[in-house]
Image: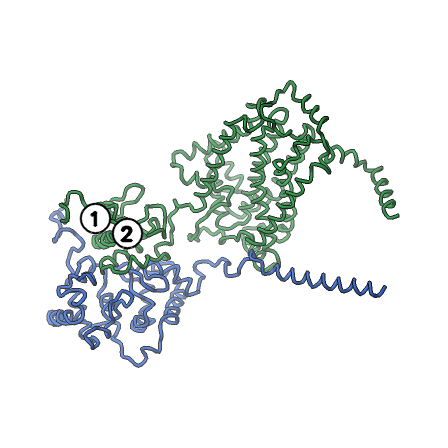
């Protein structure tokens, strides 16, 4: 009784809207049965993340105040006062992390399966643009946190832009809304993050999906079988005819299951790890800060920190555009040929190389040992075993080591700055004369301290450093001295 | 009919109870930001332990225990120095030594109120105010004889040094395996007379150096003996400490 009435209402609607052909042409389209694979779930999961980001983003925009003096405060309100405000921020933060990670996985899978080859070149191109837009969303989102990371991160981002010949200055002022980072900057990034980029992403996603439907989903690659643009269309049509099954309800179940796992993971991560708290207001007078970008930009952060300064402009102006263009050019350079990863060792090696490089740089960026630990001199204690049994002069030397901020770059048994070598066993490496020379003249990336230390300070410092060796290790001796002398 | 309604109602109640429990559990999820993690500007931090960890630990050790600089977690030292002197030292630093000025007006990073919080915190956490209530401690500032009395004070200081210090620092102050030299010119250049006095009075119990009253001799050092020992040690300062040559280099002052 009830169901027939429902069906009648459905028919009435269908008669007027004509949704069935649309549904059959999209969700019901035929896919090769071998494409119903666990390898094919990353794209749909990225889309699910996008939907979640839009939903949580709308909720956040209800509270967030996009003004330079209140943005940071409104996040504090969300984190600490608004009930479940922190959870909402956590969902948006983890959603963005998952989205970038899944998008990267999707891209790698598409590349390894040769899915970008004929006739799906434009689908790849569209995906690359989506990749860039998503990174843009991640960067602008990081700016909206409007904390010290945002402030200094944006400073670096804009400096990168400022290196572009001729256009640099105009671009900088376009992005910042003036010559400096100020109130207008935040509103610009707000409109980019909330209107421009999401609009672009939605448009590109529609285009991307349209092309997936039009060209059909890539068949699971077979060893030894490649793409020949002359015959591919006929082969694919034959494959669909032979093994095709509707995406909905047949092939979709893996996507649904994986998306559910992704949603569950985002919900759980937000609940367990919470949101990323803003790390202090964007006030350039607060110098006690170690700005660090979110994980997707850590690799870039490391590259810029580790690169010699004269290489920076070259990298920004030439290498980065070339890398992006190379990404776009992949399907046009390698339009046909083998698809299976086992037939394309260079492609696989390329992915491994790129991912290893990016991951290594990101891990380095996490600890950013190249930055001095600016508070170590007053906040990191001298290990107790390096205090015990020391003479009054050596104790003074340890105090000099701290007070002259040697500790900001040099660790003692692992604690302290990591920019210079650990001094915990320095006595085994350098003789007294070598230590004095190194302290006075510097060298090897260390400044000369000759003019900042008095002779007694040098004497005390070196006396202390000469005590730093593991219990059973011999101390470095001047080779010109007679043995035992 | 009414039984079914009853079941429905009890089901609804159970659901309500579960939702209340779940929602209240949500409030104690591990991801919920701890108000203690809320950002505090460095110049607004007033918590003693945070201030001490961020500013003093480097030289004075964690919790004021066993760093290269004087032992702050020592009730005797805190009673002997007193809040006024502590505040002055933290604010202005000790010129010529490794102790920098921490007051913002003097180039440091702390506001006067934060320094007050540090001093009050040290006294409250490690001070044991009652322990020295009945005892007369040596005054923080010692006296030093005038020019006429200086030679005499040194002679007396030398004698007192033999009694109280020579056991560990050797008769000539050159140090023994137990404790190093205290006449080393570079050491003396990096410590003020007041610092020497503080070391003699408070000792370094963490490093095995006894306080003025705890010597093996069996009696405490008198005020005069403390002052004389300091005078004797200070007498070993040299004009050009820390140089491998004993006198000023010949070219000093002769540049065109």
**Quadrant of residue A303 within the rendered picture:** top left
Residue A56 is left or right of residue B99, and the answer is right
Disc 2 secondary structure class: loop
Point out the residue furthest to the top here. A230
Residue A376 is left or right of residue A475, and the answer is right
Q: Chain of mark 2?
A: A
Query: Along the line of sight, which residue is nearer the eye, B73 or B152?
Result: B73
Co-location on one chain, circles 1 and 2: yes
Point out the residue furthest to the right here. A1
Q: Position of residue A117 (x, y in %)?
A: 60, 25
Query: Along the line of sight, which residue is nearer the eye, A96 or A233?
Result: A233
Chain letter corresponding to the colour green: A
Q: Position of residue A65 (x, y in %)?
A: 59, 52
Point out the frontmost of discs 1 and 2: 2
Q: Position of residue A76 (x, y in %)?
A: 55, 56
Residue A418, can we see it? yes
Point out the residue furthest to the bottom here. B134
- From mark 1 to mark 2, how far is it between C-alphas? 17 Å
Disc 1 secondary structure class: helix
**Quadrant of residue A304 within the rendered picture:** top left
Vertical placement of residue B137 versus B187, above or below? below
Number of residues whose C-alpha sits closer than 10 Å to that of mark 1, classed few (under 14), some (14–19) or many (20 or more)? some
Q: Which mark is residue A432?
A: 1
Number of residues whose C-alpha sits closer than 10 Å to that of mark 2, classed few (under 14), some (14–19) or many (20 or more)? few
Per the image, the residue denoted by label 2 is A470
Chain letter corresponding to the colour blue: B
Q: Chain of mark 1?
A: A
């Amino acid at each position: 009784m009830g169901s027939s009435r429902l069906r009648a209402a459905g028919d009435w609607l269908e008669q007027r809207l004509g949704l069935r052909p649309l549904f059959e042409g999209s969700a019901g389209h035929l896919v090769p049965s071998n494409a119903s694979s666990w390898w094919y779930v990353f794209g749909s999961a990225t889309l699910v993340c996008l939907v979640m980001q839009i939903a949580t983003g709308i909720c956040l925009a209800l509270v967030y105040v996009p003004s330079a003096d209140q943005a940071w405060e409104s996040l504090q309100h969300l984190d600490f006062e608004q009930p479940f405000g922190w959870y909402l921020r956590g969902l948006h933060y983890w959603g963005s992390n998952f989205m970038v990670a899944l998008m990267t996985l999707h891209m790698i899978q598409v590349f390894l399966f040769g899915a970008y080859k004929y006739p799906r070149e434009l689908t790849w191109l569209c995906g690359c643009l989506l990749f860039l837009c998503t990174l843009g969303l991640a960067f602008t989102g990081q700016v909206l946190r409007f904390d010290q990371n945002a402030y200094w991160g944006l400073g670096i981002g804009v400096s990168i832009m400022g290196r572009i010949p001729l256009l640099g200055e105009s671009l900088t002022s376009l992005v910042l809304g003036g010559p400096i980072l100020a109130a207008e900057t935040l509103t610009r990034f707000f409109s980019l993050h909330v209107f421009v980029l999401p609009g672009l992403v939605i448009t590109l996603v529609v285009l991307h999906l349209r092309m997936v439907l039009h060209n059909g989903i890539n068949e699971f690659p077979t060893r030894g079988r490649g793409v020949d643009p002359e015959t591919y269309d006929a082969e694919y049509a034959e494959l669909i005819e032979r093994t095709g099954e509707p995406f909905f309800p047949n092939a979709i179940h893996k996507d649904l299951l994986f998306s559910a796992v992704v949603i569950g993971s985002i919900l759980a991560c937000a609940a367990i790890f919470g949101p990323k708290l803003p790390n202090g207001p964007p006030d350039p007078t607060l110098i006690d800060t170690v700005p660090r970008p979110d994980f997707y930009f850590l690799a870039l952060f490391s590259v810029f920190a580790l690169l010699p300064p004269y290489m920076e402009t070259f990298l920004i102006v030439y290498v980065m555009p070339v890398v992006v263009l190379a990404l776009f050019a992949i399907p046009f350079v390698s339009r046909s040929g083998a698809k299976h990863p086992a037939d394309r060792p260079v492609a696989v090696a390329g992915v491994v190389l790129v991912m290893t490089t990016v991951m290594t740089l990101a891990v380095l960026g996490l600890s950013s040992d190249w930055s001095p630990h600016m508070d170590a001199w007053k906040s990191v204690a001298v290990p107790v075993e390096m205090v015990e049994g020391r003479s009054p002069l050596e104790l003074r030397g340890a105090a000099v080591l701290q007070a002259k901020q040697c500790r900001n770059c040099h660790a003692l048994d692992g604690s302290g700055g990591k920019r210079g070598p650990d001094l915990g066993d320095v006595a085994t490496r350098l003789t007294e004369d070598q230590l004095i020379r190194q302290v006075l003249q510097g060298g090897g990336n260390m400044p000369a301290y000759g003019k900042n230390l008095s002779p007694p300070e040098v004497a005390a410092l070196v006396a202390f450093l000469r005590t730093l060796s593991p219990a059973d290790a011999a101390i470095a001796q001047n080779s010109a001295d007679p043995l035992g002398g | 009919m009414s039984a079914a309604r009853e079941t429905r109602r009890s089901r609804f109640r159970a659901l309500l109870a579960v939702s209340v429990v779940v929602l209240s559990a949500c409030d104690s999820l591990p991801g919920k930001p701890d108000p203690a993690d809320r950002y505090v500007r460095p110049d607004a931090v007033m918590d003693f332990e945070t201030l001490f960890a961020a500013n003093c630990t480097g030289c004075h050790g964690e919790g004021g225990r066993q760093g290269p600089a004087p032992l702050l977690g020592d009730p005797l030292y805190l009673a002997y120095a007193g809040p006024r002197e502590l505040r002055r030292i933290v604010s202005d630093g000790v010129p010529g030594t490794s102790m920098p000025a921490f007051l913002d007006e003097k180039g440091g990073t702390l506001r006067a109120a934060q320094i007050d919080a540090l001093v009050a915190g040290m006294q409250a956490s490690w001070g044991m105010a009652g322990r020295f209530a009945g005892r007369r401690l040596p005054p923080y500032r010692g006296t030093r004889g005038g020019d006429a009395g200086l030679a005499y004070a040194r002679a007396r200081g030398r004698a007192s040094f033999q009694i109280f210090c020579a056991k560990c620092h050797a008769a000539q102050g050159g140090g023994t395996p137990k404790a190093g030299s205290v006449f080393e010119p570079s050491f003396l250049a990096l410590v003020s007379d007041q610092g020497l006095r503080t070391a003699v009075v408070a000792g370094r119990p963490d490093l095995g150096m006894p306080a003025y009253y705890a010597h093996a001799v069996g009696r405490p050092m008198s005020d005069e003996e403390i002052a004389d020992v300091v005078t004797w040690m200070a007498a070993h300062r040299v004009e050009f400490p820390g140089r491998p040559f004993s006198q000023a280099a010949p070219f000093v002052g002769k540049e065109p």
